[in-house]
Image (cartoon, helix red, strand yellow):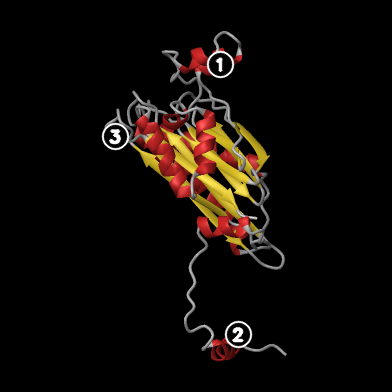
Amino acid sequence: MKKSIFSWLRKRKNKAAVAQENVSTVPLSERPAEQLQAKGLHLEPQQLVFACGQSVGKQRDHNEDCVFAFSLAIGGDTRSYPLGLFVVADGMGGHRYGEVASSTAVRTLGGYLLKHFQPSLVDPSVSMDESLQDLMRSAIDEAQRAVTQAAPGSGTTLTAALVLGQQMTIGHVGDSRAYAVQSYGNGEALTRDHSLVKRLEELGQISSEEAAVHPQRNVLYRALGQGEVLEPDIFTAPFPQPGYLLLCSDGLWSVLSESNLYKQVVGAKDLRSACQNLIAAANEAGGPDNISVIIVQLTS
């Protein structure tokens, strides 16, 4: 026979009143999650913990970058998974309304994706007809239209990671980057820069050392808001485990070596400190551009 949930809760409360007198609860933060994993304890449901940071840099007077970070966890007998969306956009310097372009792109893409996930979150019986890659493509197309209308003549990079369970779907335009960082200190760039200099490097016409100091290294051949036809890179990959997902603008990766990026991420006491240390290191290296970073970890 079914009983009222309220009567059950009252009985539980009376029985546990003394035991619970001095107990308090807080949301699981990144540091406790890391400590539990270090002890070999398994967390259910899995959760995406993250930190993000920004700086205007040392040589700019305003910020044209924009970040978006969102996560939730769903746990139950039939469905248990984390959902997260993480985005970095860098408004194109030298163009009108660069900050408007980046903000418009991030908010439009974020709103589009979350709106399409909402029905299935509220009602588990609702399924999505589109694949995640198709959904990411549609969201980027929507962001392209919004940027063209809100900031004509401007443009922005966009690097987004939609994480569902242990898989992530990446949508990428421009030269912001996504990295997979392993917990033992190695890593790799997941995205390919849509820049003139990177293309010359891929064709073997210049070396990576020459690319790093090339006078046209900031020239993009693909960006949101530029041109009517947009061809974003969209792909799905496993979330790095054990490890981290790192998203950043070129204000970070252009002044720090990849080995230094990875070292700062795995060597910090927590994700927030890692973001702070990366930004401090980029500013110490001259801070020539706006700096944005998001670091994400999947608990296990």
**Residue 260's spot in the image, x, y percent?**
50, 32
**Residue 146's spot in the image, x, y percent?**
44, 37
Three-letter code, disc 3:
His
Q: Residue at x 47, y 81 (%)?
A: 22
Q: Secondary structure at mark 2?
A: helix
Q: Quadrant of residue 262?
A: top right
Q: Secondary structure at mark 1?
A: helix
Residue hosting label 3: 62
**Residue 112's spot in the image, x, y percent?**
52, 47
Distance Cα–Cα, label 3 vs label 2: 54 Å
Q: Are marks 3 and 2 in contact (CB under 8 Å)?
A: no
Q: Quadrant of residue 292?
A: top left
Three-letter code, disc 1:
Arg
Label 1: how many Cα within 10 Å (few below 14, some 14–19, many 20+): some
Q: Is residue 148 visible?
A: yes
Q: Secondary structure at mark 3?
A: loop
Circle 1 or circle 2, nearest the eye:
1
Q: Residue at x 45, y 49 (%)?
A: 272
Of residues 83 and 114, the one drawn nearer to the viewer in this rendering = 83
Residue hosting label 1: 199
Three-letter code, disc 2:
Ile
Label 2: how many Cα within 10 Å (few below 14, some 14–19, many 20+): few
Q: Earlier in the sequence, mark 1 or mark 3?
A: 3
Q: Residue at x 30, y 31 (%)?
A: 58
**Residue 273's spot in the image, x, y percent?**
44, 47
Q: Earlier in the sequence, mark 3 or mark 2?
A: 2
Distance Cα–Cα, label 1 vs label 2: 62 Å
Residue hosting label 2: 5
> Is residue 86 positioned above or below 30 on the image?
above
